[in-house]
Amino acid sequence: MKSNLFKKGFKNIFFSLFLMFIGPTLLFQSFKNEDHPWFVPVLLISIIICILSIFFGIKGLKNIMNSIFKKKEGKVVK
């Protein structure tokens, strides 16, 4: 198991969890203030944050899975 990929994967997962709370909170606030002039920018930022949370979650899971199951380089399996 590669520990640097494993740590990097958990960092991505924790960052994704942080964004999973921030994105929907901003989305809720933007829909609550639809008549405000900052409605559209806050809505776009919150949607981008939600998409980034999904991206970092998948990237973190991929790094964790690669650290656990990937074959080590340099060894030839016969």
Image (spheres, rainbow, N blue to C red):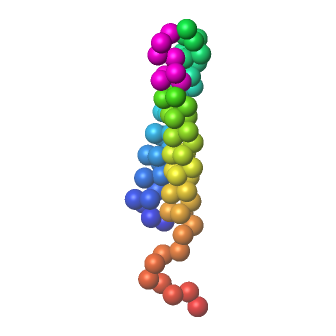
Residue drawn 48% across the image and 40% down it = 14
Q: Residue at x 46, y 56 (%)?
A: 6
Quarter in which the C terminus is drawn: bottom right
Q: Which of 36 and 3 lies nearest the eye of the viewer? A: 36
Percent x, y of residue 17: 52, 36
Q: Is residue 48 magenta?
A: no
**Residue located 43% across and 52% down the image:** 8
Residue 1, position as x, y percentages in the image: 48, 65
Q: Residue furthest front?
A: 37
Query: Is residue 41 a member of the stretch shown in magenta?
Result: yes
Predominant SS along the magenta part: helix
x and y, in percent, of residue 4 in the image:
40, 59
In this rendered view, identify the residue nearer to me: 35 or 50: 35
Furthest residue toward left: 4
Relative to 68, say whether 55 is above or below.
above
Query: Residue 67 or 50: which is nearer the viewer?
Result: 50
Q: Identify whether 9 is placed above or below 40.
A: below
Write down the region rendered in magenta.
36-43
Residue nearest the observer in this picture, 43 or 71: 43
Residue 64, horizontal then vertical, whole percent? 52, 56
- The part of the image, by quadrant, that contains residue 77 is bottom right
Q: In the figure, residue 57 lies in which quadrant?
A: top right
Would residue 66 appear left or right of 7 to someone viewing this image?
Answer: right
Q: Is residue 65 visible?
A: yes
